[in-house]
Image (cartoon, rainbow, N blue to C red):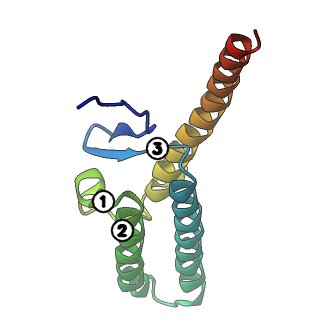
Amino acid sequence: MKELKIATGVEEYLLAGRVAVSFNPTDMNFLERLSRAFSELDALQEEVHQSREKIMDDREVFPIARELDGKMRGILNDLFGKDICEPLFGSMNLYASSGGLPVWANLMLAVTDEVQSALQGELAAREQRIAKYVEKYKK
């Protein structure tokens, strides 16, 4: 049987050298999940900030942060369809900071940067491919 090879755009990415994920960075379904996850994570981040303002004893924030960390891990794991949080972050709370941002935000911004780059690359490739076929069949 003859097989046709079809480009799907699915790429494999290694996150911080610890866990591999696969997705097409131009897939609108993935982009929708990414956008929804970013909004949900941002809302949880705000929830921690609001909790800190209301709490008199700083130690009371720990169980709240632990609970919200669990929710964040669920959102990120759902986005990629597998457990990425345990191998990537271990027991670190996702509210921990690195480079001035929470570690969850660093992950999401890295993915967003890749998506933007892939979208730009695909637009350029599309124009070249269309031009090739236009020239071929224009004769």
Q: Earlier in the sequence, mark 2 or mark 1?
A: 2
Give the mark toward the camera: 3 or 2.
Answer: 3
- Name which residue lies at 56% across and 44% down: 26
Disc 1 crowd rating (10 Å Cα; few below 14, some 14-19, many 20+) is many
Mark 1 lies on residue: 85
- Compared across the picture, whether 59 is left or right of 91 comes to right
Residue designated by label 2: 73
Q: Residue furthest right?
A: 138
Position above or below: 18 against 69? above
In percent of the image, x 37 and y 66: which residue is there?
Answer: 78
Q: Nearer the viewer, residue 41 or 123?
A: 123
Q: Which of 82 and 95 lies nearest the eye of the viewer? A: 82
Circles 2, 1 touching at the beta carbon (< 8 Å): yes
Q: Residue at x 62, y 39 (%)?
A: 116
| Residue 24, numbered circle | 3
Give 40 or 128, whichever is nearer the viewer. 128
Identified by mark 2, the residue type is Arg
